[in-house]
Every structure is written in C-alpha cells, then in structure tokens.
Amino acid sequence: MKFDPQELLKLRNVRRVAQVFFFSLFLFLVFITDLRYLKGYPASIFLELDPLVAFATAITTHTVYMGLLWSVVLILPTLLFGRIFCNWICPYGILHHFTGWLLGKSRAEERERIESNRYKKLYSLKYVILIAMIAAAIGGTLQIGWLDPICLFHRSMSTVILPMINLFIPSSIYVRQYFHVGAWIIGFILLFLVGMNVLIPRFFCRVLCPLGAFLGTLSSVALWRIDRDPNKCVDCDLCLKSCEGAADPQTQLRKSECFVCFNCIEDCPEDAISFKFLPSLKREVTAPVVPARRAFLGTLVGLGFYAFGRTSGASDRNYDKKVIRPPGSVEEKDFLDRCIKCDQCIRTCPTNVLQPALMESGIEGIWTPILNMKIGFCEVNCTLCGEVCPTGAIQRINIEEKTGTGTFVDEGPIKLGTAFYDYGRCLPWSMETPCVVCEEVCPVSPKAIYSREVTIIKRDGNPITLRRPYVDPALCIGCGICEHECPVTDEAAIRVTAVGETRSKDRRLLMDGGDVSSVRNLEKRDR
Amino acid sequence: MSSSNHKDLAPDSGDSVSRREFLVRLGITSALIAGTGLAARQLWQPKHYVPGFQKEKGLQLKSYALEASKVLPSLAIAHGTEHEKTVRAALTALGGMERFVQKGDVVMIKPNVAFDRPPALAATTHPDALRAVAKLCLEAGASKIIVADNPINSPTGCFFKSGLTAVCADMNLDLMYPEASSFSPLELNGEILKHWTFFHEPFKKATKVIGLAPCKDHNLCHASMTTKNWYGLLGGRRNQFHQHIHSIVSDFTLMMKPTLVILDGMNVLMSNGPTGGRLSDVKPMNTIVAGTDMVAVDSYGYSHLLERDIAELTYLHKAHDRGLGNVNWEDTLHKEVTA
C-alpha cells in the first residue's frame, strides 16, 4: 500500500485513534484498580462520566454524589454533536465495534452489509428499556446497572475477564487466584452480547443500550448532524455500508440513532453527505420513535419491578443473613437506590471477600456486592471499596471512621454483622481438640473473641486442658476473618451474619448505651 | 482428491487408484491406527488408587547455619533507641555481618508480615529493622536480597501497609509474593510435621537465610518470636497447626537452620497478640537480640522483653529437649552491649 498522508488523516482514522485511546485508558484504569497500583488514579472516571448513572441516581437519591458531577462533561458534547460518545469514547461500544468487525459482516458482500445496517423497528427496544429503568428509579430502585454499558463492562472485567486472564497466566493480575460466585452467568451474558454481533452488527448498542437511548434522546436537540444533499444523492445506499448506528443516512437521518462515526461521509461516492450545522428539520427524524403504548408498557414493567421486588421482602423483614454489605455501605433500601452493580468494589477488594450477589438481596440486588467469608474477609485497615464506589452506595469513609478510632471513638467502629459460634462444629467445644485460630486472627483490640481455659476428661479417660472461644458481641465488627480462618472449612464453626450491622437501626443487635460490655467501655477509655 | 475430479482428469482409468494414492491412503489410515494404539497404551491407568492417601514425597531443606564458633558469641543483646544503630551494635557484638554474609551471597530475609497492620502497632516486622539488616547485608557484599513471607491477611496489603513494600522498592530488594507456583512439598521428620507445602521459591537462589521477627504476645502459644516466624514459610491448611501448636512450632527448629535470627524488641507487642491493634498494646523495650540459636534468642525475648516466665513456653522446651537449641540463654556464649 502506498503511503498517502491524506488517506491517513481521514476522519475514520482520527476516530480509530480516539477509540484506541479511550479503550486503552479503560483497560489501564481497570488494571490499576488494585491496592498495589491505585495511587489516587480516578479508577471510576468512566462511571462518573456516565450521565445515565448521574441522572438515575439523582432520581433515586435527589443528589449527585461527588465525582458524578463529571457527567456534565459528557452531556455537553451530546447536546451539540449527538451521540459521539457511542462510537468515540464508550469502551463497551468500541468492544462491539471491534468484535462486530472481527466476527460480523465486515467481509460480507456489499449488498449484505448495506442490508444489515438498515434501521429496524427492534432498535426502539432500548428506549422502552430506558423508560422501564427510569420508572423503576422513580418507584425507588436503581436498576440501570443491568445494561448500562459502563457498569456492564466494568462488571464483566471484575468478575470474568480479569480472573480468566489470571487463570491462564497465574499471578498476572492477582497474587492468589480470585473467585466470583456466579461468574459463569456474567461470562455467558458477555459472550452472548458479543456473539450477537454476528447476526446484527452492534446488537447491544442498537437494541439494548439504555445509555445510548438516553444520549439519543438528548441528541434530538443537537445543533450539528449528518446531512444528505438530495440534489447530489444518487440513491446508491453505499452510505449504509459501514453505518454503525443504523441511522438511515440514505434518507431522513434518524438523529437519535446516529453514532456520529462519520463512515457515511467517506463512503459516499458523490460527496452528498456532510456534517452540518443546523440543517433542515425536514430531512431528519428528530426524536426517537417509540410507540406510546410500548412506552406505557415499559413504565408498567419498571414500576412492577420495583413493586414486585420490594414486596418480596428481601430488603425488609425477610432480609437474608448473608446480605453483609461492605464497610461504609448505606442502609439497605438506600443501598438499592445507589448501587449500579458496576462491581468496582469487587475489583479493588484485596481479599476477594466481595462477591456479586445472586438472589440473596432479592431480584433488585442481583450483582450487588456482599461479603462471602468463605472466600475472603474484610481487612480492618482498608477502605478501598468506598474509594472506588462512584455512587456512594459505599460511602468514602476513612480508616478512623471505619475502626472508630481517633475522633470517632464515641461512635465506635462500623460493624458489618456479628459472629456466632456453632459449638457443635467447634473443635474445642465438642471434639476435645485445641484450636482457637479464630481468637488469634481477631483483629480488634481488645479481641472480640476471647477464650476460657478448661480441663476436661477426654473419652479415653485422660485429662486435656484447652481453650474454648466466645464472642463479645459489643466488640465484634463482623469482619469475618474468624470464619475465613476456621479449620472447619466447608461450614465454619463461627459464622458472621448480617444482624448487628451499624448501617441500619433496624438490624442492630445490642441496644445503644447501658452496660452491654464492660470491655467495650474499657476500650473507649484506653483509646 | 475427490473421485469425480479424478474421473474428469482420467476418464479411462475407471474406479482403479494409482499406486501412489493407494500407498498414501493406506499409510494415513495405518498411522492413525498405530497412533491410537500407542496413545492408549501410554495413557492407560491399569490400577485404581485410593484418593487422598497417595504416598507423599518432598524436598528436604538444606542447612544455612554456620559452623559453631568457640570464640565468637552466639547470642548478642543490644540496647538502643534507633533501629539501625542497635542492629549494627548487635551484629558487631557477634563479630560483624561479615561473619554471616560474604561477597556474592544471595540473602533471603524472612520478616513477619502476617497481618495487614501499620508499623506502629508492632504486629509486623518494622520497616526500619528491615532497612537496617538489609543495609548491613549489602555492606557485607550481598549480591541480592530476597524478602519473602506468606501472610495470613492479603499478601499485597500486608507488605504494603507494614511499610516493607516501600523499603524493598527503595533499596531494590527482591520482594517475593507467595504465588501458587512458589510452593513445593517439603519432607520433614518432625514431631507432627511430616509433609507440608512449603514456600520454596526464595530458597531456590538463597545462599544465606536471616529470620527477622518482631517480638509479640500470642493468644495460643504465648509468644511469636524468631521460631514462630518460620510459620510464614508454610502454605496449605495452616489453621490445623493450632491443634498441636507447641509441637509444630518446635518442629520449625528442625525444619529451618538459618544463618542468623534477629529479634526486634524495640517495640514489643505485650498484649492482644498476635494481631495487636492498639498503641496501648505496645511497649518500647529498646532491644535487639541477634544470634545463631533461635531457641536461645527467643528464651531471652520471652523472659526479658515480654517479661514472662520461660517455664510456660512449651515449644522452646520441646526444641531444647530434642537438642535443637538451648533454652538457657545464659549458658550460651553471649554478649550484652549498648548502642
């Protein structure tokens, strides 16, 4: 191929450079979301730029949390130029663009490619999905995380792709292999969405993406757009050959569908297409086309999701003992108002204790983080999950606030739950065997687990002196290292359950004040 | 090579095949038959086995200890207020680091970073202690220093928050994390320890081994000092050790024959061990104990730093009774200095 500077400076290539840049930036940020490398990098910046995250959490919480203000930066160009995010910046869009090229119809015959890029009624589904998600948010449950592309991609990275890389190349990502409960479900969803590019190019972006629908709606007022000069056009349809958004550039442009990839401009042999400032409204379909009755149906589904979810009781009276939330988490119903299931907390957790929930916290809480002490434990001197949480589902607490030290002595430590003994499974309690690993690893001072020395007569008639452990519920912070290190590994003899968590008044165990534990008072005095 | 093609090319030959084609096709089929047979023979497992009861084999760790000296002391106690000066004084009393580390040696330093704790809580080897020991090793001519431990908490978190990651980066020491591939089975004729998975990677290159342990209270075995420090070289189901803790810890004196052990008693974790958690658990004792006999070092530590009755520290007596060290530190050749 001959070197041609003009060829090199084509819009297509400029766009490709941007795509490689933003995709690499995303991968870089995902990689450094680790205790060793996370040195003040804005690890969740893509989520904070995502206007759907800011918009939907603003509906549920009436606030815009910390870094989510960055989303304004993305709304602005959308209002001027349309959905440039989708084909220039969005890492998930870039993934589908690339895999669509790799697996899809890029090598097919010209006619087939043109046909595959015509607009289909199916593509309005994403607006119905968006309406359902907003309706759910108005009801009071945040569910954009199912399909918001940034959440979806971060989640896939945290729970599937990085563990997979580490499985094939040990210690490349983690010192010890990480596990994620139900990772296979998230993995197959990813494979399905990527695989659908074979049948419909940009299937996810065109059909499902609620962020695309949100930006598409904003694009209605964009001042610039792709415009076709009908006097020059010879109706060859070649502009459809590489049209990413299926936006009908060959006729009236569907403004809300256009990804502003600029392929049509360069594919047009007649130079009939240009990117124009304030072109005639007659030559465009300005707003998204969504039949009113389907929009209504979407609203019903969204409100129904909220109502059916809440009345199942998982966030209320029937809460599961396994719903142990990360330190700094807000009260459960507020948590469901904020968590976008991006699983950045799961990515950054240094012990792998954070796991994507399945049905523990109900249908609303699928893929939200819960602690699984069989896999890990909550490290006392660590607040990384709150550092990376973009929405404040896990608040950005510091170590003093977490451990109840320094100026937070009066509040005391944040408790995630309480540890309970199952004496029937405990070696010193019922099997005449010394142990108390739980006491050894208990990280609070004074230890919440204490032991009493007893001398018992064994079955064989010989005496043995051993220590039998107890929990002081006033001191236990529910970190779960006792459960994690218990030698009874299938179902530990000490297990943490959610009751006693300080984030919720309804789920506390001991009444505040009074003489619940003299040791606790001693602890306060000593600090 | 379809038959229709063949017919088109040579319509007269009918259904017959050429000699060449006959041989090639026969050859391919025969090779596949033979290959199948060979593979089956190779892969066939003719006998069953009982899962979980296979005969275990493992490596035997060599001794890194020096020959005993009749002139130089085997135990040094140095009092001082600064890590570097006090460590240096203790080593000088033993005859200098040159006695233990020669030019070109690869030194493995085993700190205790079992828990994710800041240095002030005295639950982990202090970064200043590592810095001081590493400096002495480099001065003595060590070509490389490896720092390795298999913590109870997350390895990256423990090294990071104990401050050792920073020291390693600063002094260009080789920090080894306990990766899955770092472990090999170990064989030992211990009282309880017979076979265990061992953090072998650092020992593949090391020519000298130095144990550098903090002096800590321990809820179950009373104290964690230089002997208990070797716990961090084992992998697998360590939470079973507690069922025979004194036997296991005494087995460490058989397992590991280090060049030198150093007990950091500058700040001692007096209570709530081995994790600590409050500054009030820590007491400044301003002492560094170094020596070639970890049992003697620990017996000094227990009686003079933790200030307790040595009679109750069963694991040291077990080691002493097996001839693996001397629990009566006063009987060894020792020297007490002030930095």
Image (spheres, coloured by chain):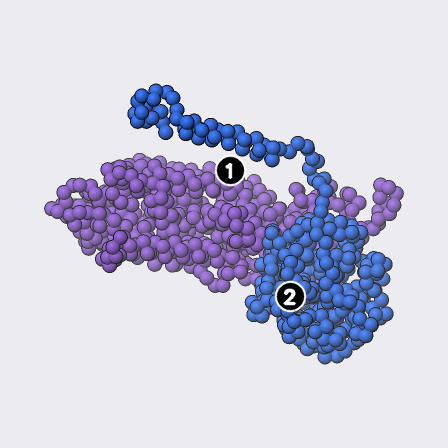
Chain colours: A purple, B blue
Quadrant occupied by the N terminus of chain B: top left
| Alpha carbon distance from label 2 to label 1 | 63 Å
Q: Is residue A354 visible?
A: no
Contact check, label 2 and label 1, Cβ < 8 Å: no
Tell me the tag on residue B106. 2
Place of residue A75 in the rendered image (x, y in percent of width and height, measured from the top left): 32, 55
Q: Quadrant of the C terminus of chain B?
A: bottom right
Instruction: Please report the residue visible at 26 percent of the width from the left and 45 percent of the height from the top.
Output: A243
- Residue A511 position within the rendered picture, expressed as x and y whole percent measured from the top left: 64, 52
B41 on left or right of A206? right
In the displayed image of the protein, which residue is found farthest to the bottom?
Answer: B339
Q: Which residue is mark 1?
A: A312
> Could you tell whether B196 is left or right of B314 in the image?
left
Q: Secondary structure at mark 2?
A: strand
- For mark 1, give the secondary structure: loop
The amino acid sitting under disc 2 is Val
Nearer the observer, disc 2 or disc 1?
2
> Observer-nearest residue: A209 or A409?
A209
Instruction: Give amino acid for label 1.
Output: Ser
**Residue drawn at (75%, 56%) of the image:** B255
